Image: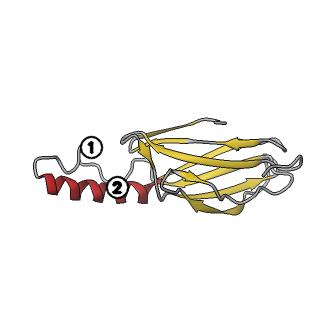
């Protein structure tokens, strides 16, 4: 919940390689009160079955910059293991369609953005094993 003195942040992740929400991705939230200030870790959470992270910590008063750190490597490793098991069950499907790649090319994604007190910032992450995109949502 935002007030006139603080901003608020929410996020969700869509795995565009499968067209589904990315469940179980750990997310850490940090904030600072100016461009030259130190980052303060505020805590974190993980995405739910809908790819949403609804319980990020509140931002402290005076926050001007926010950083979301998405731990994507463990998500892709678990997904690769699931795909390999499914491929073995089908026997004719390739176990790894990404040219032998395992894990993720981007093992973590850090998104930093400026905030204004009283505003809400929804920052979705569109993710695939070899790229990502982010935007300010609503």
- Residue pushed farthest left? 92
Q: Residues within 10 Å of mark 1 (few under 14, many from 20)?
A: few
The residue under the point 89% across, 49% down is: 5
Which one is nearer the viewer's eye here, 58 or 128?
58
Quickly name the residue at label 2: 79
Q: Which circle's residue, 2 or 1, is located before the other in the chain?
A: 2
Position of the C terminus, as image quadrant, is top right
Instruction: Tell me if 22 is positioned left or right of 67 in this view.
Output: left
Q: Is residue 20 above or below residue 25?
A: above
- Residue 78 visible in the snapshot: yes
From the top left corner, tell me how far across and down residue 117 is, in percent.
84, 44
From the top left corner, tell me how far across and down residue 70 is, in percent.
54, 53
The residue under the point 86% across, 55% down is: 61
The residue under the point 77% across, 55% down is: 59
Instruction: Tell me if 62 is positioned left or right of 92 in this view.
Output: right
Report the mark closest to the observer, 2 or 1: 2
Residue 27 tag number: none
Q: According to the image, what is the colour scheme of the structure?
A: secondary structure
Q: Secondary structure at mark 2?
A: helix
- Residue pushed farthest right? 4
From the top left corner, tell me how far across and down residue 105 is, in percent.
39, 47
- Residue 114 visible in the snapshot: no
Total numbered badges shown on the rendered structure: 2
> Where, by quadrant of the figure, is residue 116 drawn?
top right
**Mark pair 2, 1: CA separation:** 13 Å
The residue under the point 65% across, 59% down is: 55
Quickly name the residue at label 1: 98
Q: Residues within 10 Å of mark 2 (few under 14, many from 20)?
A: some
């Amino acid at each position: 919940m935002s007030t006139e003195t603080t901003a608020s942040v929410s996020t969700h992740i869509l795995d565009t390689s499968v067209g589904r929400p990315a469940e179980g991705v750990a997310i850490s939230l940090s904030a600072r009160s100016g461009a030259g200030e130190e980052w303060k870790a505020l805590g974190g959470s993980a995405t739910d079955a809908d790819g949403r992270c609804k319980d990020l910590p509140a931002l402290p008063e005076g926050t001007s910059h926010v950083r979301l750190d998405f731990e994507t490597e463990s998500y892709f490793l678990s997904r690769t293991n699931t795909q390999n098991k499914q491929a073995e069950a089908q026997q004719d499907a390739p176990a790894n369609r990404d040219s032998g790649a395992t894990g993720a090319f981007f093992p973590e994604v850090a998104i930093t953005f400026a905030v204004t007190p009283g505003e809400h910032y929804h920052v979705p992450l569109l993710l695939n094993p070899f790229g990502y995109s982010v935007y300010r949502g609503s």
